[in-house]
Amino acid sequence: MTYNKESKKKKPNKWLALLSMPIQMGLVIFLFAKLGSWLDVKFQNSHSIYVKISTLVGVAIAFYNLNRQLKEINESDNTTND
């Protein structure tokens, strides 16, 4: 009975990765919103433009990270099924 090296390597649990994604997204968006709030106070902005812009940047980064992680999960899932 022979095993290839790939089967010996422990693969990360994809369900654990999927469950942690909303936490990661929320944390990124929250931190960018806090940054924008701090910038609004520091630069005396009454229209809260820094909060709005930084929150949108945080959402974009969170979705990019989500997309990247889902692609990695799909690629690793496809290689194990082959």
Image (cartoon, rainbow, N blue to C red):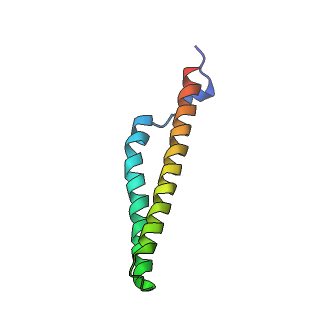
Relative height, residue 27 to residue 34 (above, below): above
Quadrant of the drawing holding the C terminus: top right
Q: Is residue 61 above or below residue 69?
A: below
Q: Residue at the location (51% across, 39% down)?
A: 70
Give the quarter of the image for residue 71: top right
**Of 57 and 23, the residue lying toward us:** 57
> Within the image, what quadrant is residue 27 found in?
bottom left
The number of numbered discs placed on residues in the rendered structure image is 0
Horizontal and vertical percent position of residue 15: 40, 36
Can the viewer see residue 9? no
Residue situated furthest front in the rendering = 47
Q: Could you tell me which quadrant the N terminus lies in? A: top right
Q: Residue at x 52, y 36 (%)?
A: 73
**Lateral position of residue 44 relative to residue 69, left or right:** left
Q: Where residue 5 appears, x then y in whole percent?
A: 62, 28
22 to 13, vertically: above or below:
below
